[in-house]
């Protein structure tokens, strides 16, 4: 499954598939640990996933890959330099 990891304005990471359907979010706590956060709809899809803590976004993505029962080719979405005013 191809997934995209995109950083949002609050500094968290959104994980989505190629059709831009949200899979989950990854947040970083004040201590630097990463946690997987699921909405009500996402819990059914990733029910048995370990939520954290993870040392990095890549480590969290590995957990997501294992839970989806297949390899994920994830890439960080790039934002053009002129995107922010």
Image (cartoon, rainbow, N blue to C red):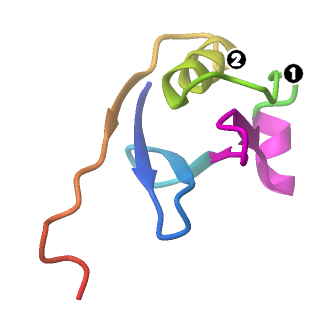
Tell me which corner region of the image, top left, top right, bottom left or bottom right, holds residue 61.
top right
Ranked by sequence position, the earlier of labels 1 and 2 is: 1
The single residue placed furthest to the front in the displayed view is 31
- In the picture, measured across the screen, residue 44 lies left or right of residue 82, that is right
Tell me which corner region of the image, top left, top right, bottom left or bottom right, holds residue 12.
bottom right
Residue 23, position as x, y percentages in the image: 61, 44
Find out whether the residues at labels 1 and 2 contact each other: C-beta distance under 8 Å.
yes
Residue 37 magenta-drawn?
A: yes
Label at residue 16: none
Question: As displayed, is residue 71 above or below residue 16?
Answer: above
Residue 67, position as x, y percentages in the image: 70, 17
Which residue lies under the disc numbered 2?
67
- In the picture, measured across the screen, residue 73 lies left or right of residue 69, that is left
Question: As displayed, is residue 18 above or below residue 58?
Answer: below
Question: Which structural element holds mark 1?
Answer: loop
Q: Which residues are magenta?
A: 25-45
Label at residue 48: 1
Residue 27 magenta-drawn?
A: yes
**Residue lying at 32% horizontally and 40% vertically, measured from the top left:** 76
Q: Residues within 10 Å of mark 1 (few under 14, many from 20)?
A: few
Q: Quadrant of the C terminus?
A: bottom left
Give the CA separation, mark 1 to mark 2.
Answer: 7 Å
Residue 35, position as x, y percentages in the image: 73, 37
- In the picture, measured across the screen, residue 50 lies left or right of residue 85, that is right
């Amino acid at each position: 499954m191809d997934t995209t990891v995109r950083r949002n304005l609050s500094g968290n990471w959104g994980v989505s598939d190629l059709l831009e359907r949200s899979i989950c979010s990854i947040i970083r706590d004040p201590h630097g640990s990463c946690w997987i956060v699921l909405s009500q709809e996402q819990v059914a899809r990733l029910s048995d996933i370990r939520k954290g803590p993870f040392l990095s976004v890549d480590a969290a993505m590995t957990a997501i890959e294992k839970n989806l029962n297949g390899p994920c080719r994830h890439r960080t979405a790039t934002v053009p330099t002129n995107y922010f005013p």
